[in-house]
Amino acid sequence: MRNNLILSCFIFVLSLVMSSCDGGGNNGDIVLEGIISNPSQFSEITAIILEGNRSLGSTKVNSEGNFIISFRSNTGVVTLRFESATFNAERPNIPVVNQSTTNLDITLQLNPTLIIIDRWRVFQDPISLSGTQAINYNERQAEFNMDGDGGNCMFAGTDSLITYIVKSISITNCREGVRAQGSASIFLNADESIQISSNRDAILTIDDGFVEVGQTANPVNNTIIIQSNNQFGINAAGNAIVDINPQNSCSISGSRAAVNVNGNASVNTSSCTLSDG
């Protein structure tokens, strides 16, 4: 009886601790953080994340202009709003993905009232999709970063779809870099640089998988580096397709070979320089 009472008290105390750690509606696996360059021009500022008319979280901006809000999104598109006694404005159509951090450098402008995003960085945890899951991230100002920390970085299986159309792409420190299998497709398009580096295959496609890496419709200075330390730069089998479409310089390298093709697979390396060994 006494032991049960002690256990009940322990669980109650633990629940209080966990509730206090959660705090203020900031639960979630998406983080939006930023710094406002000119906070001293305004009275106390509140940052709010909205999905439609629903608030997903809010916080006060500190005196240095920093803020951070964690939340969950049902739609993958949110609005960032700032409110103060002298400033009220929204920045709609901010795409977000689970297990990611969006970091914004911001200037608030009066006359006209505007939220100006000076720099937009996304730090994404590894992605693994299956079934009919899809990610469609389209933001030409965003610098996309994924560090695999030695694990697999980006996987799409079955009929899933991953699309990133951004300013730049960096997928590094991977076991496997980018893998599409089944009938899945992965599109990685950037205005500027694209880097994919891994310990094993940098790009692997099997079955009817499809991977496209290349420039956007209006590139600025698109370059591509695809590198494998111990396997193939590109490894394609089955009926898979890989299409590499750079604007300017492009290199593909692998310790075993830059490109390995089996079955009915096809790989288009465009004007890329291929390096083996």
Image (cartoon, rainbow, N blue to C red):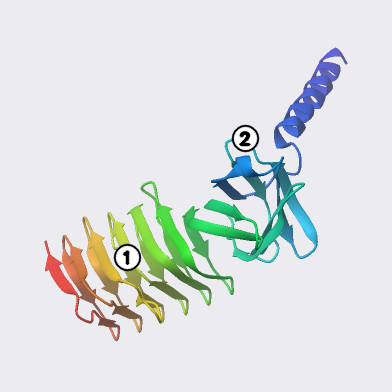
What residue is disc 1 on?
A: 193
Residue 275 appears at what percent x and percent y? 13, 67
Name above or below for residue 3 compared with residue 249: above
- 1 and 2 marks in contact (CB < 8 Å): no
Q: Could you tell me which residue is drawn at 55 percent across and 52 percent down?
A: 106
Q: Quadrant of residue 20?
A: top right
Residue 102 visible to an observer of this rendering: no
Name above or below for residue 84 compared with residue 227: above
Mark number for residue 126?
none
Name above or below for residue 169 compared with residue 41: below
Q: Quadrant of residue 227?
A: bottom left
Q: Residues within 10 Å of mark 1 (few under 14, many from 20)?
A: many
What residue is disc 2 on?
A: 63
Residue 198 appears at what percent x and percent y? 29, 56
Nearer-the-camera pick, 11 or 105: 105
Q: Residue furthest top?
A: 2
Q: Could you tell me which residue is drawn at 65 percent across and 47 percent down?
A: 70
Q: Could you tell me which residue is drawn at 79 percent across and 23 percent down?
A: 13
Nearer-the-camera pick, 106 or 114: 114
On the rendered structure, is 252 left or right of 111? left
Q: Residue furthest front?
A: 111
> The N terminus lies in which quarter of the figure?
top right
Nearer-the-camera pick, 10 or 23: 23
Mark 2 secondary-structure assignment: loop
Q: Residue furthest bottom?
A: 264
Q: Quadrant of residue 96?
A: bottom right
**Amino acid type of the residue tagged 2 in the rendering:** Ser
Residue 71 appears at what percent x and percent y? 68, 50
User: Disc 1 or 2, which lies upstream in sequence?
Assistant: 2
Q: How many marks?
A: 2
Q: CA distance from mark 1 to mark 2?
A: 35 Å
